[in-house]
Structure formats: C-alpha cells, structure tokens
Amino acid sequence: MQLESERRPQTPLFPPWSSGLLRWSVGAFFGAPIIGIAALIAWQHSPYFTGQTLTKPQPLQFDHRHHVRDLGIACTYCHESVDRSPKAGMPSVGLCMGCHAQIWNQSPELAQLRSSYFSGAKLAWQQVSLLPDYVFFDHSVHVTRGVACASCHGAVEQMARVHPVAPLTMSFCLDCHRAPRDQLPLAAARPGTDCTTCHR
C-alpha cells in the first residue's frame, strides 16, 4: 500500500524559469566587465574622445581655404617657428596686419584684428590639435625631416574652419614611427619607438 505522499507529484524547489534567470545572471556577471572594457576602448578611439572633426570658437574667422588654397600662403609663413621649435606657434597680429593694413583694412570682420594691433592685446586663439601634457612632441624634428603638415593636420587648405583630422593617439603616432607612410626622409631617420621618445 502506497503512502499518500508517494502518490502526489513532487513540487520542484525552484520554478522552471529560475534556471534561465541563473544562466542570464552568471552571463551578465562575467560579461558586463568585458563589455564595459570593450566599450571604453571603443570610446577612447572615437571622434568624441579624440576631438576629431570638432571645431573650436576662434576670435577671428580665419578661412584657410582662401589664404592657403587661393593665395598659396605656406604653412610656415604664419606658423613661422614650426621648423625650429617644438610648437608650431601662432601668427602675430603684426604679421596679419602686414597684409591687412592694405587689404580689407576697413572690413568689419577684421575690426578685432585692428583693435588688437593698435591696443597691443593678443588674440586668444584656441589650439585645435591637443596632446596630453605627458606627451612630448617636437614640430621642428618632424618638419625638418620632411614630414608634411597634412600628415597629421589633414588638408587644411580645404577647411573653412580648421578641425583635427588625425586621432593623435599613441597608436597613431607609433604606426607612423614603425612604418612611415609617405615620408622617405623620416624613414631614413629611423624614428624611435621606445617610451622615452615621447614620454620624458
């Protein structure tokens, strides 16, 4: 004779859906950090982090298309310290007025330039391409070895407002140092790839 408890079906300790929940929870626990790290790496290589394509407000609307493409002014004319200094430098107000004392000398668009020139106040240009403080970069070393400005700054002569083109990340710089693209003189110079080349 069977006992009453033996005839009744056994009720499971956990409901059937709990197995799926357990699998999902374990997957989320181990997968979330991996997804988070992958998302962080992707974000660091995105234009939102590197600043590519983002323009900055400038005190004057300087159109590189007109000055570089149309008039043929070389980069080194305005950025005159680029071949002898770590920094490219910005043109002085006096350099600008060398032309604009005769050309467009009554233009309202250049009122701030004239005011700056006569008052002696500097124009607050915003640097477009930025590197972290812990990175050492010398423009003169690259320029004197034949690296074209466009290699890092893109086709500035086609920009109404200059914006960063290259990501300027560590991998971008190392890729160029390991296999210089179109710079034969740089290839002959054997650029360094050890840490102290850029981190001093």
Image (tube, helix red, strand yellow):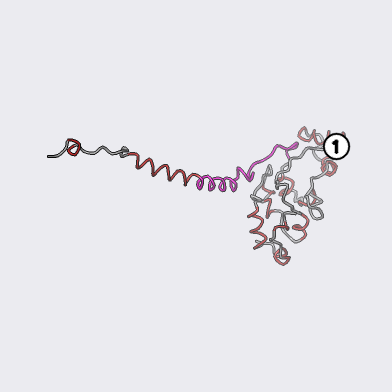
Rendering coords of residue 171 (x, y %): 63, 55
Q: Is residue 21 left or right of residue 145?
A: left
Q: Is residue 200 left or right of residue 17?
A: right
The relative height of residue 144 versus residue 165 in the rendered view (above or below) is below
Circle 1 Cα neighbour tier, 10 Å, few/some/many (<14 / 14–19 / ≥20): some
In this view, the residue farthest toward the bottom is 188
Q: Residue at x 14, y 39 (%)?
A: 2
Residue at image mark 1? 117
Whether 58 is among the magenta residues is yes
Quarter of the image that includes the C terminus: bottom right
Q: Residue at x 77, y 50 (%)?
A: 73
Question: Which span is picked out in magenta?
Answer: 33-61
Rendering coords of residue 111 (x, y %): 80, 33
Residue 127 lies in what quarter of the image?
Answer: top right
Q: Amino acid at mark 1?
A: Tyr
| Viewer-proximal residue among 7 and 41 | 7
Whether 87 is among the magenta residues is no
| Viewer-proximal residue among 109 and 132 | 132
The relative height of residue 48 versus residue 106 in the rendered view (above or below) is below
Rendering coords of residue 81 (x, y %): 81, 51
